[in-house]
């Protein structure tokens, strides 16, 4: 297993900077997810690591070895794509054995490794079946087994779960996570699905326009986003964002200038920024019913409450925008007249969307 380092990596396609000067290291055995909207450069980064794309500038290192210009075969990486590329005329057992035979491993060794894959992936009867006869989840499992049986230095996964039904995807996520932990493989996984990223990653690398916006454990991105984009991209349901006015004495939201309760150290940070306008973000789970007459709570108008599973949500209007908060489960049809914002969980942004640092 290798540590993978990208050093000022850039890839240009004509005028497009698909990857724009990124530097980051993925530790040995780490499960990293590259996350971001379509076109942000995730796949190009992954293909560079695989050797399928050439960097325009910068370096790629596996441990101490520079691999930037080595062909894919020489890098000992395994890659699994969204659409499985198993050999259709071979059964799963022979598909898994194929890369081992190709490098001349003996029969006993191949049998041992297939048994090992069977144990890890619980392949059972699918070993004897051809890919075309298998459901998508089982096919993807076989593709993963074929990728990891070679014991690659790095496992690269490009949206491997996105062609699988939601129902099986959760099971596959679970399998993937266990597999990765058990084998301790350095794994780099690309997805645009933030839920998938948050449930799989040791560390999420959020990208936008070819650059890294933020890299950290999932909880860090959720609780401490560096900007409005990160706050918005991570979290489901998504963060409530609203224009705010900053004054010496407080913060007021929207056109109606609804005052909110702000802790003194946050006010100090806002004053220090010298800004008079900005934006406020608050996650739905930090927006809960207020006690009556509470100062700094926001009024609820045009409410709709509904349940998703065991959780109850409340959508309401504030300054022409729909806001979402949560209600205690079992609260029935009662709707509060005001919602409380957890002051320690409020994000403040500049008008350009950069997060204001607060102590
Ligand atoms: P998606 O989730 O849609 O695959 P992505 O984040 O993986 O998106 P990339 O596929 O890496 O993004 O693409 C980054 C940018 O580079 C996009 O603007 C894309 O159009 C462009 N691009 C990627 N590959 C090529 C290519 N071979 N030739 C020209 N432009 C390309």
Image: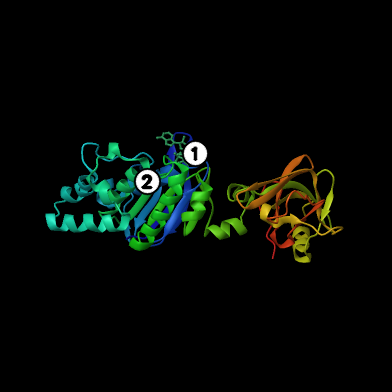
- Residue drawn at the location 47% of the way across and 56% of the way down: 201
Tell me the crowding category of disc 1: few under 14, some 14 to 19, or many 20 or more residues within 10 angstroms, Cα based: some
Q: Describe residue 114's horizontal placement relative to residue 345 as left or right.
A: left
Quadrant containing the N terminus is bottom left
- Mark 1 beta carbon near ligand 1 (under 8 Å): yes
Tell me the crowding category of disc 2: few under 14, some 14 to 19, or many 20 or more residues within 10 angstroms, Cα based: many
The tag on residue 39 is: 1
Q: Secondary structure at mark 1?
A: loop
Q: Is residue 151 visible?
A: no
Q: In x, y percent, where is residue 146?
A: 27, 49
Nearer the observer, 93 or 69? 93
Q: In x, y percent, where is residue 120?
A: 31, 58
Q: In x, y percent, where is residue 115?
A: 22, 57
Quick one: which residue is furthest to the top in this view?
14
Report the colour scheme.
rainbow
**Residue 105, image quadrant:** bottom left
Q: Secondary structure at mark 2?
A: helix
The residue tagged 2 is 48
Q: Are marks 2 and 1 in contact (CB under 8 Å)?
A: no
Q: How many marks?
A: 2
């Amino acid at each position: 297993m290798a540590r993978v380092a990208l050093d000022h990596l850039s890839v240009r396609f004509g005028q497009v900077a698909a990857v724009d000067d990124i530097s980051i290291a993925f530790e040995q055995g780490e499960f990293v997810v590259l996350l971001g909207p379509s076109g942000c450069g995730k796949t190009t980064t992954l293909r560079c690591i695989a050797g399928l794309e050439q960097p325009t500038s910068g370096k790629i290192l596996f441990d101490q070895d520079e691999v930037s210009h080595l062909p894919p075969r020489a890098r000992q990486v395994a890659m699994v794509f969204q659409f499985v590329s198993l050999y259709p005329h071979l059964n799963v057992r022979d598909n898994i054995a194929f890369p081992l035979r190709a490098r001349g491993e003996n029969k006993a060794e191949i049998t041992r490794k297939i048994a090992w894959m069977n144990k890890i992936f619980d392949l059972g009867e699918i070993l004897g079946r051809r890919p075309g006869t298998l459901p998508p989840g089982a096919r993807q499992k076989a593709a993963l087994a074929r990728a990891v049986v070679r014991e690659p230095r790095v496992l690269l996964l490009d949206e491997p779960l996105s062609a699988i039904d939601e129902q099986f995807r959760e099971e596959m996520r679970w399998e993937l996570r266990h597999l990765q932990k058990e084998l301790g493989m350095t794994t780099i996984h690309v997805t645009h699905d933030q839920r998938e990223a948050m449930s799989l990653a040791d560390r999420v690398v959020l990208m936008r326009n070819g650059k890294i916006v933020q890299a950290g454990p999932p909880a860090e991105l959720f609780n401490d986003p560096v900007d409005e984009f990160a706050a918005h991209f991570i979290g489901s349901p998504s963060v409530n964002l609203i224009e705010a006015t900053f004054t010496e004495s407080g913060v007021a939201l929207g056109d109606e200038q609804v005052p909110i309760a702000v802790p003194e150290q946050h006010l100090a940070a806002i004053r220090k920024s010298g800004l008079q306008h900005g934006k406020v973000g608050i996650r739905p789970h930090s927006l809960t019913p207020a006690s009556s007459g509470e100062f700094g709570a926001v009024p609820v108008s045009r409410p709709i409450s509904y349940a998703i599973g065991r959780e109850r949500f409340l959508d309401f209007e504030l300054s022409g925008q729909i806001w979402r908060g949560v209600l205690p489960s079992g609260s029935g049809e009662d709707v509060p007249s005001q919602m409380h914002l957890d002051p320690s969980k409020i994000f403040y942004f500049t008008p350009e969307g950069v997060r204001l640092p607060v102590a």
